[in-house]
Image: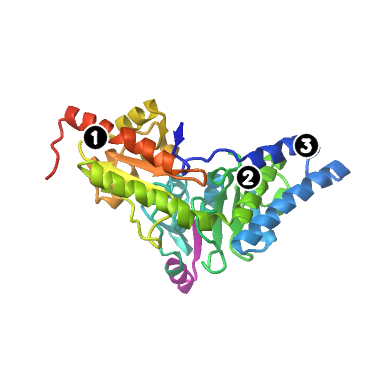
Amino acid sequence: MTYLDYAATSPLLPEVSKAMHLAEQKFFANASALHTPGHLAMNEIEHARELLAEIIGSNKDEIIFTSGASESNNTVIRSFEGHEIETSPLEHHSIIEAAKVYGGHDKPKLYSYMLANNEVGDILPIKKIAKKAHSESGFIHSDLTQSLGKIRLNVRELDLDYATFSAHKIGGPVGVGALYVRKGAPFKPLIIGGNQEKKRRGGTYNTVGIVGFGAALKKMKELESWKIYDTKVRKLRDGLAEWILKKIPGSSLNTELKPNKSLPNILNVSFQAAEGESIQLYLDAEGVIVSTGSACAAGDIKPSHVLMAKSGGDAEVAHSSIRFSFGLDSTEADIEKVMGVLPGIINRLQKMSTVKMKE
């Protein structure tokens, strides 16, 4: 299998699997308990908290563990219930839909803009947005889910009040995430009914999952993964883009390849007169795994809201797009596999299509 869907989820790292298996045996106790097994479990949780804080440049007390990025995003938006909430059309549905439910007209205003988009990889000018937010006595939240491990991050340098993270995008387990909340920033718990996380997030700790998150963070730090993404992975991504544009008629990029414009591991491409889901299924039959639109919206037949925004509402572009996303284990052989089957698939679909190719 040629797996090129890392932006949707990444395979569990061997180090993570090993750490979680050990935690199941040694750190199974309720981490809130006062007995020794409980203390041992809490020590593991705090170690993961300290590691994330070190990597993103925050204090450990500003980190709250959650069930994932969607919960973290909802928590921030819910904290500004009744207040004005500004987002971009590129945001994840957990931001856009939550803002519709909780947004109002009160002040202070919340700006919620992801640093890097999950579908096309666009990097947004977060520092500029943060400056505007704070000049208006508002607050800034950024979803850093796709950015963690791919580029250098420092929440202080970005001037953020809130930031969202997820374990399964960096080789950790699904079902674990984190939320950075700057000391003094407004906060309202989404899940109440417990004293965990200093009464900021109720519920028994997912110790095994958090240990897995910590193991993934440790590996990421040891490798300095952002350097590998900026060199090896970027080269693979750009090489595939060049091959596609050269070999496949009617292809166009939805991802800007300049280093400061997009993440190094995401490539979104549109193919004229070829439907994205059909391309995905044909590739799947050849053992090549990619995404069309956002994997989080599987089953939604509407065109990607991100690509609709990027293309100025061109549904044909949105419906004909495929996202390739690379990981640290991606190789030249993956590119060769794609180019061995993709041109033929596109040619077959274009011949079957009733849509005329543009000159």
Residue drawn at (36%, 40%) of the image: 293
CB-based contact (under 8 Å), mark 2 and mark 3: no
Tell which circle, 1 or 3, labels the residue nearer the N-terminal end.
3
Q: Give the range drawn in magenta.
A: 129-143
The span from disc 2 to disc 1 (Cα, nearest Å) is 44 Å
For label 3, the residue is 28
Nearer the observer: mark 2 or 1; the answer is 1
Q: In which quadrant of the rendered view does residue 11 lie?
A: top right
Across and down, in percent, residue 330 comes to 47, 43
Pointer 2 local density, CA inside 10 Å: few below 14, some 14–19, many at least 20: some
How far from the left and from the top, in percent, is residue 83?
Answer: 47, 58
Quadrant where the C terminus sits is: top left
Q: Mark 2 points at which residue?
A: 191
Residue under label 1: 274
Crowd tier of the residue under label 1, counting other residues whose Cα lies within 10 Å: few below 14, some 14–19, many 20 or above: many
The amino acid marked with disc number 3 is Phe
